[in-house]
Amino acid sequence: MGTESEYKIQRYSKRIMFQRVLWMILWNLTIRPFPRALMSKWEIVILRFLGAKIGKNCRVYSSARILIPSYLEMEDWTTLADHTIISNSRLFKMKKYSVFSQYSAAYCGGHNIFKTDFASEAAPITLEEYSWVASHCYIGDGVTIGRGARIGGNSAVRKSIPPYAIAFGNPCKIVGFRFSPSETIKFENERFDENERLSEDLLKHNYDKYFLKRIKEIKSFLKN
C-alpha cells in the first residue's frame, strides 16, 4: 500500500474542514435519525446556515448524504431524494425543477489513475432545469445533465448529456429525445423567458447528431 508521500491527496481549508465536521455532527444527531418529512425544513435551515444556497419549495430528504454544504446550490422546486450521496468536493448545482432520485450518487472528485502520484482531480456537477436522474445512478465529475434530460435508473454518467435527451446504461448512452425540435421549442416558450430559451439551431443540431444519425446504433444498443 502506498505511503502519503507517493500520492497527492486533496487538502481542504480549515474552514471547510470545520464546516464538514459540524455538518456531520448536526446531521447525525438532529436530522438523520428522524423521518424525512419531519426534518426536511430543519435540515434546509442547517444547510443554509453552513453556506448552502437553497431556494424555495426544495426538498432534501433526511437520509441524503452531503459532503460540503457550502458547495451545494439548489434552485426553486428541486429535490434530493432518499439515500442520495452528494460527494461535492466542488460545486453541485441543481437548477429549478430538477430531481436527483433515491440511491443515486454524484462524485465531483476522483483520482487520475494514469498519473503515478494518483493525483486528486475534481470538477463541478450541474443538473439543468427540469432534468431528472432516476434511482441508483452514478454521476461523475464535470458532468452536466442538460435541461429537461432524463437519465434512466442504474446508469453511469461520465460525459455531459445534451438538453432533453433520454439516456441510460453503463456507460450511459443517448437513446432518444423527449420531444421533436418543434415540440421542444413549444415547451421552452411556455416555461422560459425569451433570453433564457435554447436556440432552435442548437436543438435541431443535437436531435440530428445524437438521434437521427445514430438510429441504427441505438436500435442495436436497445436489443442488447
Image (tube, helix red, strand yellow):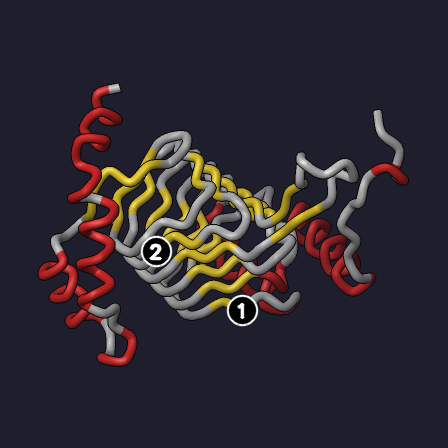
Q: What residue type is disc 2 on?
A: Gly
Residue at image position (72%, 38%) is 115
Q: Whole-percent x and y of residue 35? A: 50, 44
Q: Residue furthest top?
A: 224
Whether residue 79 is visible to the viewer of this picture, yes or no, is yes
Q: Which residue is drawn at 24% across and 63% down?
A: 202
Q: How many labels does the image show?
A: 2
Image quadrant assignment for residue 47: bottom right
Q: Name the residue under label 1.
A: 53
Label 1: how many Cα within 10 Å (few below 14, some 14–19, many 20+): some
Regarding mark 1 in the picture, which secondary structure is present there? strand
Left or right of 35 on screen, residue 2:
right
Quarter of the picture containing the N terminus is top right
Q: What residue type is labelled 1?
A: Lys
Residue drawn 49% across the image and 60% down it: 93
x, y percent for residue 64: 53, 46
Q: Percent from the top left, x then y, of residue 33?
A: 60, 42
Specify whether residue 31 is in view.
no
Query: Callout 2: helix, strand or loop?
Result: loop
Residue 210: % across, % down: 25, 46
Numbered label attached to residue 206 = none
The residue mark sitting in front, 1 or 2, is 2
Q: In this view, does 53 lie above or below 1?
A: below
Position of 208 compared to 22: left or right?
A: left
Of residues 144 and 12, the one nearer the viewer is 144
Residue 146 circle label: 2
Q: Earlier in the sequence, mark 1 or mark 2?
A: 1
Q: Between marks 1 and 2, how big is the CA–CA gap? A: 21 Å
